[in-house]
Image (tube, coloured by chain):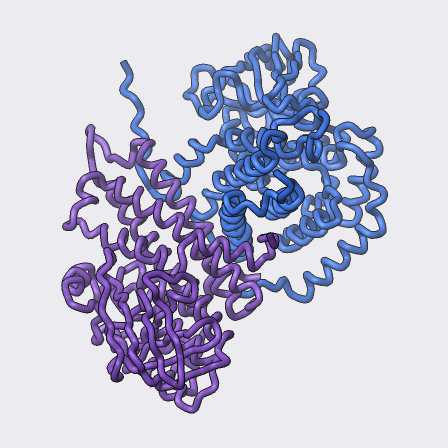
Chain colours: A purple, B blue
Amino acid sequence: MDFGLSDDQRLLDETMRAFLAERVPIERVRQLRDEACPLDRSIWQALAELGATGILVPEAQGGSGLSLLDAIVVSQAIGNAVTPVPFLSSAIVAPVALRALESPRKDVWLAGIAAGELVVGAGLTELFSIREQAGLRLQDGMLRGKAMMAIDACAADLILLPVGPDTLCIVERVATGVATTRLMTTDRTRCTAEVVLDAVRPLAVFEDAADAIARALDAGRIALAAEAFGACESMIDQAVRYAGQRRQFDRPIGSFQAVKHMCAEMIAELEPTRSLLWYAAHAFDAVPEESPMLAAQLLAHVSEIGREIASVSTQVHGGIGWTDEQNLHFWYKRIAGARHLLGGPELLRERAARLQSLVPAS
Amino acid sequence: MDLEYGERYEQFRQQVRRFLEEHKGKRPSGPFLEVPREELSRWLSLQIEHGYWARTIPTEYGGYGAAPDLLETVIMDEEFNRAQVSRGLNAQGPSMLVPTLLAHGTEEQKRRFVGPTLRGEVIWCQGYSEPGAGSDLASLSTSAREDGDDFVINGQKIWTSTADRADMMFVLVRTEPAASKHAGISYLLLPMDSPGLEVRPLQTMSGDVGENSFNQVFFEDVRVPQSSVVGRRGEGWKIANTTLKHERSSLSSNAEGMFLRLVRLMQGETVDGVPVIASPVYRDRLMRLQARMLTMKYHAMRMLTCSLKDESPGVAALVVKLQNCQLSYDMASLGIDAMGELGVLYDHTKYERERGYWQAQAFFALGLIIGGGTAQIQKNIIAERGLGLPREPKPAKA
């Protein structure tokens, strides 16, 4: 019986946090938010050299072939540092989908991901929510329609585009007929785009991809929860540090029970959620039949506690926490941006209920 | 991550199952404190003989004498729960007094009390809280004045569960009135039939007078020999803290079992001819509680691993009581809401569901939120010991 991270996973965690603190400090994040696209390929390349981009890529394609629990250690560190990198789409969603597919070209793509040379965006939104007449049609080998809030699509080389729950298309971003427009969100550390397709011939079409799509979405949900969790962790750390230093009425504000109880309530939500995060990531590989429900419940729960932690830790800082200069808003917005990216909590809980046959037929 | 217990432990599990199959019919029926003492003692002695109760207590004090092994304890709990048989005697004597005596008692005290307590022959109650000393327990004022070879006790205790049925009490009293708050307390053992001691039942909001009864205990010139002190005079606070630690770890919950029961209730309960679970609003509340239940379920595995590896879980352990008690309360509250206007039915009235289980659970959980360190005290502990935030400064003396 050993529930928790292995020594290797703890070392990976330390390595990632040290690397991101040095290579992408918050000052660098501030610079990147003003770019047309915040994804900096040199950071991505450096992550590849550390082995992070290929963590889910099989060893035969130059990756390390590790488990999702290993991968989310990286996701969490990225969320903790609010780093703008396409890890969710390129290092989680894409390899999980590609591993489950049969294609002569997939080895090249997986190798490209591991090497940090290939960035793969993912337009998954229409799998769970259709707005603005979005949706894709595949007719006579040509792809038409639009995908909303496609993750990391505007800077990607390739874009994964499910057409319904069974068919998966892979298109080149620069192919004729593809138009990607970044949709600016409150969270400037993530890149989300509209992808409009006007008679595009995909690089590949997989018609029997239901399992690949479902697994990629589950993995994406767990990894997104890990990112938001990492951001929550940082916000609590910052709030506790500030409460211990900031003095009012001749004493540290953290000595007032009103303030210290806010901190206690946040950590009391966070720590048990860490245990669920670890289990859900572990179950993805070890108990896959539990994974769809756990992924939905985990992300829903992280979204709920995340909203509270983002608000309360800002309040602990008082007025300064509300300023641009204090930087706290980067974490607030990263958490808020994750809330609906792969399905909001209401939608996810209803999915979890259906998966457990708790929705009676009407 | 490895969630297997391993071959040796699975064999142990089979052994526990065989014991239960063979012997579970011998369990006396009814609440333990209401069955005849000889029957209770026979059942507990049988469990001790096979090593399923008092497993790690040395044989010379009436235990089974095995080396401590956390996974064996977990497996015994799992299997006894599965068979719906209570393991041992869940009372304050075995859970709190015995560990304290083993750590701090004299040889004579250990020989006299540990075995009979484990076998249910001596039932104990705990005399800690007072009307004026709740969260600030160390401010207690029940006094024990020295008189020859005796102490003479005067004062009052409250929240004394099972005092009406106990044979003995372990009690905190102030023996050194001149010493500082924490240094003036001693830990005494005294018989409940001592002259001058009076027990009065304390009705709680649940209306319960069954196994969860509470009492007040009044002391008027109650005499006990000075030899009934555990540890040294004036060290009672330190000694009591060993038992409080045991209380905290014994306040675990069965959140998953309660959740499954809640699902069954919402599937069976109908309004306008439709099951409550068919309502998206109620269903969403249920699913939110499931997520919280899942966090606590896997958190317990993480805490178990920390204990097995002798690693400090830090703040992660301090949040368990706060979160579990609130979760129980919230689940009971949804149970009540699922029954709508019939949710308040009580006292075994017509149409009442599950013999008032959900109301009783809500009352009980609310008591747990307050008892054993209130939620607010828990938050102080989490923030100060867990997060290193500064303590509240003491008010300046006027």
Q: Position of residue B390 (x, y in %)?
A: 30, 36
A214 with respect to A156 (left or right) = right
Number of marks present in the image shown = 0
Which residue does the image show at 59% across and 29% down from the upper left?
A: B341
Whether residue A72 is situated above or below residue B274 in the rendered picture:
below
Whether residue A340 is situated above or below residue B96 in the rendered picture:
below
Which residue does the image show at 31% across and 82% down from the upper left?
A: A200
Whether residue A105 is situated above or below residue B70 in the rendered picture:
below
Any part of residue B161 in sight = yes
Which of the 4 image quadrants contains residue A142? bottom left
Which residue does the image show at 27% across and 48% down from the upper left?
A: A238
Q: Position of residue B199 (x, y in %)?
A: 66, 14
Q: Position of residue A267 (x, y in %)?
A: 39, 45
B41 with respect to A109 (left or right) = right
Residue at the limit of the structure toward the bottom, as seen here = A104
Q: Nearer the viewer, residue A145 or A23?
A: A145
Which of the 4 image quadrants contains residue B106? top right
Which residue does the image show at 59% across and 42% down from the upper left?
A: B276
A71 with respect to B46 (left or right) = left
Any part of residue B246 in sight = no
Q: Position of residue B99 (x, y in %)?
A: 62, 38
Query: Which quarter of the rendered picture does the C terminus of chain B lie within?
Result: top left
Q: Nearer the viewer, residue B53 or A22?
A: A22
